[in-house]
Image: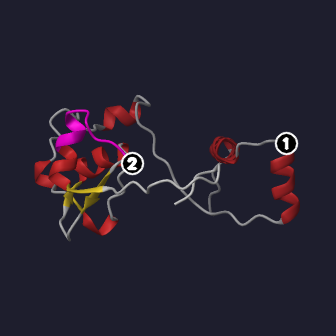
Amino acid sequence: MWNLNGMKVKAMKLEVISVKEAIGLIRNNKFTKHYKVDFKNLDVEALDAILLGKHGVVVPEERIIYNDLKIDFSDNPEITDQDIADGKLKWFVKTEIPLDAEIREWIGTENINLGEFAAKLIQNFYENIKTLPKRKAV
């Protein structure tokens, strides 16, 4: 191996360690880039995968597992109808709207937030429809 100055240097060999060893080193602030984690077809708990990822270890997606029963949701309050009525929570609708090139260009040129724009249009349309007299069949 050669460095930028054209001098020959020894290639540093990575020390291969297990997932358990890597997590232990991370928790003791001793994990460095000189380690390579060997997954050996072992599954990795989701929280451990996050911890490894924060330290530059990419866990293969197919190796990541989680168990809903092990997740503590006790600090998550129940959602009530009052939360929605008070505006603490809002319903979001995701949709795709086909736009021609001229309209896309206008949106970009005017720097329009399409989500806010569409929400205001729908709200205004709804408010206007409510003010129209109801049609009655004769």
Distance, label 1 to label 2, CA atoms, is 40 Å
Q: Nearer the viewer, residue 104 or 50?
A: 50
User: Which residue occupies 85% across, 42% down?
Assistant: 110
Find residue 110 and name its label: 1
Question: In the image, which residues are magenta?
Answer: 24-33
Task: Kindly identify the residue that appears in the image at 15 percent across and 51 percent down.
Answer: 20
Asked whether the beta carbons under mark 1 and mark 2 sit within 8 Å of each other, the answer is: no
Residue bearing the label numbered 2: 56
Magenta stretch encompasses residue 27? yes
Where disc 1 sits, the SS reads: loop
Q: Specify which label sits upstream in the sequence, 1 or 2.
A: 2
> Where residue 109 sits in the image (x, y, percent)?
87, 46
Report helix, strand or loop for mark 2: loop
Query: What amino acid is labelled 2 in the image?
Result: Gly
Q: Residue furthest left?
A: 69
Crowd band around label 2 with a 10 angstrom C-alpha radius: few (<14), some (14–19), many (20+): few
In the image, residue 41 lies at what x, y percent? 20, 71
Compared to 49, does 100 lie above or below? below
Q: Main secondary structure of the magenta part?
A: loop
Circle 1 or circle 2, nearest the eye: 2
